[in-house]
Image (spheres, rainbow, N blue to C red):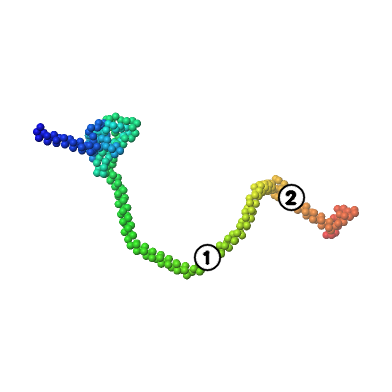
């Protein structure tokens, strides 16, 4: 073999080894059999062929193909080569996410339950994490509010400028006031002691008065108990019966057809009684002045009585 052939063969082998080693370092093993699965995304910004397919941090496959489907509203079809030993269910979610802090993209599988396993060639459920632009856009209101808050805090701090001196002056005034109060208390210590003593004595006298009031309160409670024990309901019922009788009597008195009503409303009976009393009074006077007319042995006739009366006139 010529030298040129040997150099070319070595370069070919080195290139193959480099390509294999590069993919091996990326987690791709060409000698491991794989199954193909598919995912449809609206946008695959940053996703490239050979990007890893990861389950719980372990690379189990790679992106083998990315194709635009113009007939299906420009959706992106992503073909995944996954180790054939990996079993997936119909609830498996393929998330297009960042795999590191540098922004490298990859497909992260959330396998979920395996009650209904799927066959190779089926389509997985797509999910796409928010990009940095979307995150910044959603954080824009928070940043705006934070900026407004910082501005207001600055305004408050500017408004408080010079307040430190006022606070120090206020503290000095409070300190001087405290010293003055202590001096006043020291000067009037004996008077305060006397006031406290008088107050204590007054409290003692009040306690004694309260002790004297306790028996009175006990008696009052007894009187109240006695009043509570009275048959007030029966008394009220008796009073009500009496009032009903009185009302009935008054009704009878007002009735002009009744005896009492006639006596009150008709004056003929009054006049008759008055005449009777007048006649009785005349008879008594006659009896007083002329007893012989009534008590004489033989009495006198009406004619003689009238004659005697005419003589007196």
Residue 155 x, y percent position in the rendering: 31, 57
Q: Which residue is mark 1?
A: 196
Quarter of the rendering containing residue 291: bottom right
- Front-most of residues 66 and 4: 4
Nearest the eye: 32 or 204: 32
Examine the rendering and report whether any part of residue 188 can be seen: yes
Q: Secondary structure at mark 2?
A: helix
Q: Residues within 10 Å of mark 1 (few under 14, many from 20)?
A: few
Q: CA distance from mark 1 to mark 2?
A: 89 Å
Give the quarter of the image for residue 107: top left
Q: Is residue 40 visible?
A: no
Q: Quadrant of residue 113?
A: top left
Q: Which residue is mark 2?
A: 269
Camera-near label (1 vs 2) is 1
Q: Name the residue at the right extreme.
A: 297
In what quadrant of the picture does the N terminus appear?
top left
Q: Residue at x 37, y 65 (%)?
A: 169
**Whole-percent x, y for residue 19 in the image:** 19, 36
In this view, which residue lies farthest toward the top? 119
Dot 2 alpha-carbon crowd within 10 angstroms: few under 14, some 14 to 19, many 20 or more: few
Q: Give how far across and how far down residue 182 sits, in percent.
A: 45, 67
Residue 166 in the figure: left or right of residue 51: right
The answer to whether the residues at label 1 and label 2 have Cβ atoms under 8 Å apart is no
Q: Which numbered marker is on residue 179?
A: none
């Amino acid at each position: 073999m010529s030298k040129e052939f040997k150099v070319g063969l070595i370069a070919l082998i080195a290139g193959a080894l480099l390509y294999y080693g590069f993919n091996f370092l990326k987690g791709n093993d060409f000698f491991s059999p794989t199954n193909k699965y598919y995912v449809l995304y609206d946008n695959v910004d940053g996703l490239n062929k050979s990007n890893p397919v990861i389950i719980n941090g372990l690379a189990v496959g790679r992106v083998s193909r990315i194709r635009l489907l113009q007939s299906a509203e420009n959706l992106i079809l992503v073909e995944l080569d996954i180790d054939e030993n990996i079993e997936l269910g119909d609830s498996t979610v393929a998330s297009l996410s960042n795999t590191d802090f540098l922004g490298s993209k990859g497909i992260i599988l959330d396998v979920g339950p395996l009650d209904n396993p799927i066959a190779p060639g089926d389509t997985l459920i797509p999910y796409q994490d928010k990009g940095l632009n979307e995150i910044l856009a959603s954080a824009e209101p928070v940043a705006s509010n934070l900026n407004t808050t910082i501005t207001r805090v600055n305004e408050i701090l500017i408004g408080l400028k010079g307040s430190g001196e006022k606070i120090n002056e206020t503290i000095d005034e409070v300190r001087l006031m405290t010293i003055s109060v202590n001096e006043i208390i020291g000067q009037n210590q004996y008077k305060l002691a006397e006031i406290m003593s008088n107050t204590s004595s007054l409290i003692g006298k009040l306690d004694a008065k309260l002790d004297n009031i306790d028996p009175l309160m006990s008696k009052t409670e007894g009187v109240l108990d006695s009043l509570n024990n009275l048959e007030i309901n029966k008394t009220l019922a008796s009073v009500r019966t009496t009032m009903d009788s009185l009302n009935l009597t008054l009704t009878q008195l007002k009735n002009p057809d009744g005896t009492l009503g006639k006596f009150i409303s008709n004056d003929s009976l009054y006049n008759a009684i008055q005449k009777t009393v007048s006649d009785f009074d005349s008879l008594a006077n006659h009896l007083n002045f002329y007893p012989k007319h009534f008590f004489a042995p033989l009495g006198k006739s009406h004619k003689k009585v009238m004659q005697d009366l005419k003589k007196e006139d």
